[in-house]
Image: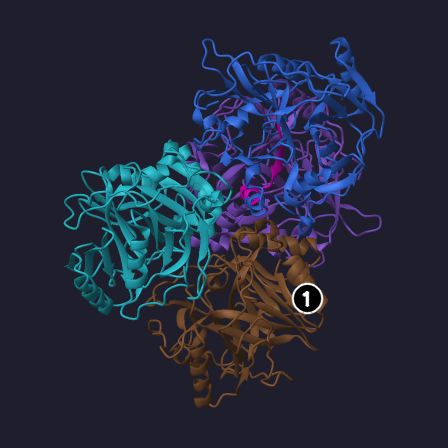
Chain colours: A brown, B blue, C purple, D cyan
Amino acid sequence: MGPATPVSTEFNILKAGHVELRVTDLERARSFYVDLLGFVETERTADRIYLRCLEDWEHHSLILAKAAAPGLGHIAYRVASEDDLTALHRLATARELPARWLQPGTERGQGQALRIQDPLGFPVEFYHEVERVPRLLQQFHLYRGTHVMRVDHVNLQVPDVEAGAAWYRDALGFACSEYTESEDTPPRLWAIWLHRKQNVHDVALMTGRGPRLHHVGFWLQEPSNVLRAADILAGAGYAASIERGPGRHGISNAMFLYLRDPDGNRVELYTCDYLIPDPDFEPIRWSLNDPRRQTYWGHAAPASWFDEAALVATFDGEGYVPIQEPIMADRPSHVGH
Amino acid sequence: MGPATPVSTEFNILKAGHVELRVTDLERARSFYVDLLGFVETERTADRIYLRCLEDWEHHSLILAKAAAPGLGHIAYRVASEDDLTALHRLATARELPARWLQPGTERGQGQALRIQDPLGFPVEFYHEVERVPRLLQQFHLYRGTHVMRVDHVNLQVPDVEAGAAWYRDALGFACSEYTESEDTPPRLWAIWLHRKQNVHDVALMTGRGPRLHHVGFWLQEPSNVLRAADILAGAGYAASIERGPGRHGISNAMFLYLRDPDGNRVELYTCDYLIPDPDFEPIRWSLNDPRRQTYWGHAAPASWFDEAALVATFDGEGYVPIQEPIMADRPSHVGH
Amino acid sequence: MGPATPVSTEFNILKAGHVELRVTDLERARSFYVDLLGFVETERTADRIYLRCLEDWEHHSLILAKAAAPGLGHIAYRVASEDDLTALHRLATARELPARWLQPGTERGQGQALRIQDPLGFPVEFYHEVERVPRLLQQFHLYRGTHVMRVDHVNLQVPDVEAGAAWYRDALGFACSEYTESEDTPPRLWAIWLHRKQNVHDVALMTGRGPRLHHVGFWLQEPSNVLRAADILAGAGYAASIERGPGRHGISNAMFLYLRDPDGNRVELYTCDYLIPDPDFEPIRWSLNDPRRQTYWGHAAPASWFDEAALVATFDGEGYVPIQEPIMADRPSHVGH
Amino acid sequence: MGPATPVSTEFNILKAGHVELRVTDLERARSFYVDLLGFVETERTADRIYLRCLEDWEHHSLILAKAAAPGLGHIAYRVASEDDLTALHRLATARELPARWLQPGTERGQGQALRIQDPLGFPVEFYHEVERVPRLLQQFHLYRGTHVMRVDHVNLQVPDVEAGAAWYRDALGFACSEYTESEDTPPRLWAIWLHRKQNVHDVALMTGRGPRLHHVGFWLQEPSNVLRAADILAGAGYAASIERGPGRHGISNAMFLYLRDPDGNRVELYTCDYLIPDPDFEPIRWSLNDPRRQTYWGHAAPASWFDEAALVATFDGEGYVPIQEPIMADRPSHVGH
């Protein structure tokens, strides 16, 4: 791994902006995300609930979409201008990727957007224009649940991380903060954390059956909120929704808790990673079988954490992208099947 | 100051049990205590709201009573048995203190109780039998506001602390944990922290115009809840209700925040004092003018904190006990008038 | 289970006072307890290091004793007076328990003490007189490591909990706060939490191979210190010393972390349980197989947590008390062997 | 105020990188910054101590320089490349600002750097090349004091904020996150928070006698560290070093504590502001006399906080830049002189 790749100058992707999760029961999902976790409802339609976090000034950072089966509707990245959308459309065309324009309002609170199926197989949206809504950051009396501040990142399970990283780094201009290599000779890239905004990641890619959305991560303000999240879920009878943690990641240094929503979609609550204002930040290398990599305190992740992930919608939204087997082992040697 | 006085064996006072505060507008008070601070409503009648905290299994630890003017309705201490009430009645009679029995249910959720006007001039209730209600300690999803755990103590402003301390120590069997002396020669007792349960205090006496209730203190689980309390109040437009703090007391070591409810009654949110399982704990002496005494970090309390306090109801409940001037200075030399 | 047993009036046990752990390498143990966990060294001799916590005013609350093998040297309870020692000696004699007097200074910083072998097989010391040393509670700049405040409790693994509980409740006057029953018909007592000071326990008894010391628990001031403990250990290369947690107990409500010292002795870091000022507190019943009992968030304890515990010294100190098998299953059905 | 100014493409300033503070007694200053606050010493020379924070991989983020009088030695901003230095040198020449090149190693651990006297009168250094040192972020066992993570910002007191803002925004490409206006008609810019990295600020300008360094801000990981800082200072006898706070800023939303080092230089400990990944973030307007602006909880800052600040070294380093009076009132109407 060399230093972080210089940023493309053709377009400027700002950050992971929102995620659309498919759920089979909107009310049940709303209870989980709003009543327990403390997301704020901005707007709802017959088949969608648009949620935001306490630091957000955008209309939404999470969409719950009614569907026959759970899974990922789409991932969205915000870009710096409308011109960036045009440049990204050129890129998609040049790469012969499925692409279409969404008219303003197709997604509530959002202007014109570009939807593509990326080379990894994921439905990805790029947008710039978005409706500004009141930010609740200092409305402390309205904080509920786990005090979710903002969307932080998505984690994608893919059969070939090196191929996926090429797209994100070389075509989209993401920089690497940390990465995991196998213990092969020579080592092979097993997972990578990539960012556009100035913290550890907007997107991570990990080796596994895919394409699947492993999880979407939301940022909390401090570790005590992570503990509070576990307490709230257990108190409300949702202890079975706690899949892993609370713990401290070796990678990213973050305090974390992994949850499964009532449809099985995985959410990470995440805090205390670090700032990366320098493009020449030297990426941190981890070995796949270093037990401190996943949980610095040495706890092994459960097998379900490797086995299970969300299918991703096809470009037409009518089905799910077929799964392929990974090109190398999908977990450390100390985690069972 | 010698070591803590041995406990009387005639009766066994367990703890400060609850306080009745008079408020002029029940709904406004309920908003403050329930919606902002997070107290739980157990029951309400036409003129009273009975509140409890998250660790409580008793029916109530705070009563809001509708009245024409704010002030203290009564303080209540719980005793270990009904026989203790009889013994306390004997004591009141021997001391020629006003005393009467309250029949079960006179106060909702409470059995027979003894009400006296104590030698300091305060309306004090002793009770044993109380209705048990569901404890919400592990219903973490129901926690609201500042996560108030239990009533901790009352602080009483009296003209003559030595006289008041004699009643509490010698007649009622309270032990001293910490005390403040003037810089006179010889030093005079300026304030005293007295306890029956095993932490720093159930009651504190401080020199000042009195008898007045200076504040009632409620226990939070950790310092982050103290910060959260200040945030919630400021967010809701109640910044003016924050009178002092957040800070760290020298005395008691507690993290604190002093609030004024919409009627001006003073409440302390309090955490991180220490445990005193040993009756021979050596009381800690402080000098009145030591700036670390009140706030260990050196901040001076505002003059209002010394000037203002709640009048206390007369024994018939019809009026307020007249105020007398203190027998010595009512504040440190570094605090103005 | 009925309500808490009334306290004996013949003697007054105040609290769990200290524990002597045997370690094979004093320097290595000192690194663990002082450099990492933040205990304070009061005094050391050729074969013992006397440690205390930040809230302590007693000479020591933990003794590390050099020995050929790890294990429990003794448990010590503090009593309210010298007369209580005499009364306890009478009790030991009446029960024909091995008992002897330790002369003042036999244990550094301690006056005359009574050592017995209790009916459960444990070496137990009772003491009153102890050297007072400077309390570091407000010397915040001297806090190190995990900010250990005080010893909280011991947890004892015994073959027959009901028999052990009879001794502690009926002979020594401990009260029950919480207990665990098997799912037999009728249910059988599987574990019990017993206290003299006013929180959840000074001693817990749990069913298992014994007599063995399962762990000694130390009190931290807030949950962030529990997380910090895990970070410190992992940072220093001691991740393997973290056996279980951080987590939230159902029983006791405490946040916890279980550690194994370099000799394998088990230590619990513990905070956020609750206060019990009322002798009629109604003991809380748990079912052995309720997954929230051990960790409210649903995590199962590792098998090692049930399998492994410290042998206890014989009365002459020359050997270890032989182990007996438990009279019923030693773990919940969801924990493997 | 319009939206944030687009970033200059001629050079790329990354962040506030370090600050050199002048102190009259190096050992006394080291005790304050290293022993109490927990900075890490990277290197020292006869007249300088180079310190870094726990998240730093750069050689230093704070320099203590021995001098006859306290004050600011220089502020340093890191740029993305050596070419940026050349472009900045062109800018300085075009503006006829004093400028000189510092050879590699002139400042320990640093490559070639550009030093200028900026139009506001401050000695400012730009650098790119810097020695990489071990980052201690996950060496949790080495954390001391208040767990200082990184330098966050400088706050500069200047007579004419609008003029200063023009330099930072228009010439250097900083973006505005928040600002304060007077209550004049039309309102005048009283203070401004400007950033290059993606949080609230790298530099703030406030109206007052100047040019003076008001304070340098360091980032902590969570609010409990702010409380711990106050405790540590008070415990060590440095309560008088606590000038203001702990509190919550309205502007920036940060939890803060302002300290004065033994020479009177002011340091802010700072945490819990927010992320700004979007260049079109809409700057937040505050009114000078809004009491929640400075401390959201309503506390007024002390007069010293407006009156006192550090003189700044002249370009030749031999003296201090003369002070000029501000062009408007230097404090809110509710703060006295």
Please report the bounds of the magenta region as a residue range: B215-230
Q: Position of residue C163 (x, y in %)?
A: 74, 38
Q: Point out the image quarter for the N terminus of chain A.
A: bottom left
| Snapshot quadrant of residue C299 | bottom right
State whether residue C337 appears in this view: no
Q: Position of residue B240 (x, y in %)?
A: 55, 38
Q: Secondary structure at mark 1?
A: helix
Say left or right for B155 vs D49: right
Local crowd size for mark 1, using a 10 Å CA cut-off: few (<14), some (14–19), many (≥20): many
At label 1, the amino acid type is Ala
Q: Residue at x 52, y 59 (%)?
A: A55
| Snapshot quadrant of residue B98 | top right
Work out whether residue D200 or residue B196 is closer to the camera in this orientation and state it. Answer: D200
Chain ID for label 1?
A: A
Return the residue at label 1.
A29
Q: Residue at x 72, y 34 (%)?
A: B64
Q: Position of residue A267 (x, y in %)?
A: 59, 66
| Snapshot quadrant of residue D7 | bottom left
Work out whether residue A225 or residue A82 is closer to the camera in this orientation and state it. Answer: A82
